[in-house]
C-alpha cells in the first residue's frame, strides 16, 4: 500500500498497487472483461488532462439535456477545482459524471493514445534506419479541405528527430516562381540523404485545387498531368521513395468540420476563402480528383486512399501503412500490428466507383 500526497503535502488516500487493482502483475488493462469501463477502472486512467481534439466527440441528446463534448471547448473547460479533483479516483469519477463525459469515448481515446504511442516508437526506429542507410523519403499528404491532413502529419512527426525530418507547406507562388517551371520550387524541398520530408499539400495542387479555383489555365493543368508521372519516375529512378496519401471524407463530414472550426477560436485560422467554397464546388473537386487518379496513379508512385471520416482510425492506419511499406531495421521486433486495415487504407484501382465516403 502507498499513500498519494497532494501538492500541499497532505495525504489524499491509499493507493493500491497495479497488481491489486487488476489481478495481473505489471499488465493492467482497462475493462478487459466486457469492453466497458467500470468505476474501479478509473484507478488506472492517466490523470493528465486530455488535449482538445484528441477524442471526446460531441453527442446530440434530447432537448433540454446537457450535451457531452470535448474537454477544452467552450462550456467544457476545467476549473482549478476540477484539476484538484483529478488527483483522486473518487474525484475523477465525480468529475466525469458532472461533465457528462461518455466513458466509452474515454476508453476509446485511451486505447487510441496507447496504440498511437506504440506506432510512434516504430517511426523513431524507421527514422534511424533512414538516417543510417541514407534513404530519401517524400510523403505527400493530399485530400479535400478539412480531411485531417495536418493532424495526421503532426502524429507522424511528433517524436521524430527534427534534424532529419521536415514538413513542407508552401504558400502561394511568388511572382518569380510563377515564371519558373512549375516543379522548380518543389525540387528545392525534396529530401536530402537520410531525410524524411512531409508535404502538406504538394505539386498536386495543380491537379485539383488550382483548376477548380481558377488559379491555373486549362493548358497549364493538362501540361502538369503530362509531366508529373515523368517527374516522379525520375525521382524514383534516382532512389527517392514517394508515398502519396489521399485523405477521403464525405461532404457531410467536411461541413461538420468546417462548422467546428468556426465555433473554435483556436482553429478559426484554418478557415480560408478556398475552404469557404469547398462545399459549393464539391462536384468540381470530384471531377478533377478522379482525373488526377486516373492519369497519375502508377506502379512506382501509387495513390493510397485513406478513409478519413474517423480521424483516429485514419491517423493510426496511415502510420501503419508507412511502417508496413518500408523494410527498416528492427521491424521484426515491433510489439504492435503493422499491417494496415483494408477497410481504412486502400490502394487506388481504376474500377473504384466512389472515393469519397
Image (spheres, rainbow, N blue to C red):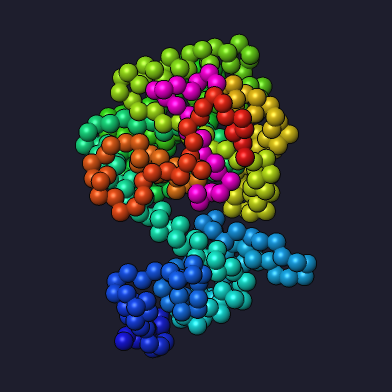
Task: Say if 2 sits above or below 54 in the image.
Answer: below
Left/right of residue 4 with respect to residue 151 in the rendered view: left
Residue 244 location, quadrant? top left
**Quadrant showing the N terminus:** bottom left
**Magenta highlight on residue 204:** no
At horizontal 37% and vertical 83% (from top left) the residue drawn is 15
Residue 315 in sight here: yes
| Front position in the image: 28 or 176 | 28
Start and end of the magenta stretch? 293-313
At horizontal 33% and vertical 45% (from top left) the residue drawn is 123
Task: Say if 193 sits above or below 18 in the image.
Answer: above
Residue 69 location, quadrant? bottom right
Residue 170 in sight here: no
Q: Residue furthest left?
A: 132
Task: Say if 332 sits above or below 113 in the image.
Answer: above
**Magenta highlight on residue 298:** yes
Left/right of residue 294 with respect to residue 3 in the rendered view: right
Q: Residue furthest right?
A: 63
Q: Where in the figure is residue 201, as x and y percent of width and height?
A: 51, 32
At horizontal 31% and vertical 30% (from top left) the residue drawn is 136
Q: How many marks?
A: 0
**Quadrant showing the C terminus:** top right
Q: Where in the figure is residue 43, as x and y percent of width and height?
A: 43, 77
At horizontal 45% and vertical 75% (from top left) the residue drawn is 41
Left/right of residue 84 with respect to residue 162 in the rendered view: right
Q: Where in the figure is residue 348, as x and y percent of width and height?
A: 50, 29
Amino acid at each position: 500500500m502507498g499513500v498519494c500526497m497532494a501538492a500541499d503535502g497532505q495525504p489524499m488516500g491509499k493507493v493500491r498497487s497495479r497488481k491489486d487493482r487488476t489481478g495481473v502483475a505489471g499488465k493492467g488493462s482497462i475493462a478487459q472483461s466486457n469492453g466497458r469501463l467500470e468505476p474501479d477502472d478509473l484507478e488506472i486512467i492517466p490523470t493528465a488532462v486530455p488535449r482538445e481534439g484528441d477524442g471526446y466527440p460531441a453527442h446530440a441528446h434530447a432537448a433540454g439535456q446537457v450535451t457531452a463534448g470535448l474537454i477544452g471547448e467552450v462550456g467544457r473547460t476545467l476549473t482549478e477545482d476540477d484539476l484538484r479533483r483529478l488527483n483522486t479516483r473518487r474525484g475523477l469519477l465525480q468529475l466525469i459524471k458532472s461533465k457528462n463525459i461518455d466513458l466509452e469515448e474515454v476508453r476509446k481515446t485511451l486505447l487510441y493514445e496507447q496504440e498511437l504511442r506504440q506506432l510512434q516508437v516504430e517511426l523513431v526506429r524507421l527514422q534511424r534506419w533512414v538516417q543510417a542507410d541514407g534513404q530519401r523519403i517524400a510523403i505527400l499528404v493530399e485530400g479535400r479541405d478539412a480531411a485531417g491532413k495536418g493532424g495526421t502529419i503532426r502524429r507522424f512527426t511528433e517524436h521524430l528527430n527534427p534534424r532529419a525530418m521536415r514538413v513542407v507547406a508552401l504558400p502561394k507562388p511568388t511572382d518569380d516562381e510563377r515564371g519558373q517551371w512549375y516543379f522548380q520550387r518543389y525540387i528545392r524541398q525534396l529530401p536530402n540523404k537520410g531525410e524524411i520530408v512531409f508535404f502538406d499539400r504538394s505539386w498536386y495542387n495543380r491537379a485539383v485545387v488550382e483548376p477548380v479555383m481558377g488559379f491555373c489555365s486549362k493548358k497549364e493543368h493538362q501540361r502538369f498531368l503530362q509531366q508529373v508521372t515523368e517527374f516522379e519516375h525520375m525521382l524514383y529512378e534516382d532512389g527517392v521513395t514517394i508515398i502519396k496519401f489521399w485523405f477521403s471524407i464525405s461532404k457531410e463530414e467536411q461541413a461538420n468540420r468546417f462548422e467546428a472550426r468556426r465555433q473554435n477560436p483556436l482553429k478559426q485560422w484554418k478557415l480560408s476563402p478556398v475552404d469557404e467554397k469547398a462545399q459549393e464546388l464539391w462536384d468540381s473537386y470530384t471531377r478533377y480528383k478522379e482525373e488526377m487518379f486516373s492519369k497519375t496513379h502508377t506502379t512506382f508512385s501509387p495513390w493510397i486512399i485513406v478513409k478519413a471520416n474517423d480521424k483516429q482510425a485514419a491517423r493510426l492506419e496511415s502510420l501503419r501503412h508507412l511502417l508496413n511499406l518500408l523494410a527498416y531495421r528492427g521491424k521484426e521486433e515491433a510489439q504492435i500490428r503493422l499491417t494496415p486495415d483494408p477497410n481504412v487504407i486502400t490502394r487506388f484501382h481504376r474500377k473504384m466507383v466512389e472515393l469519397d465516403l
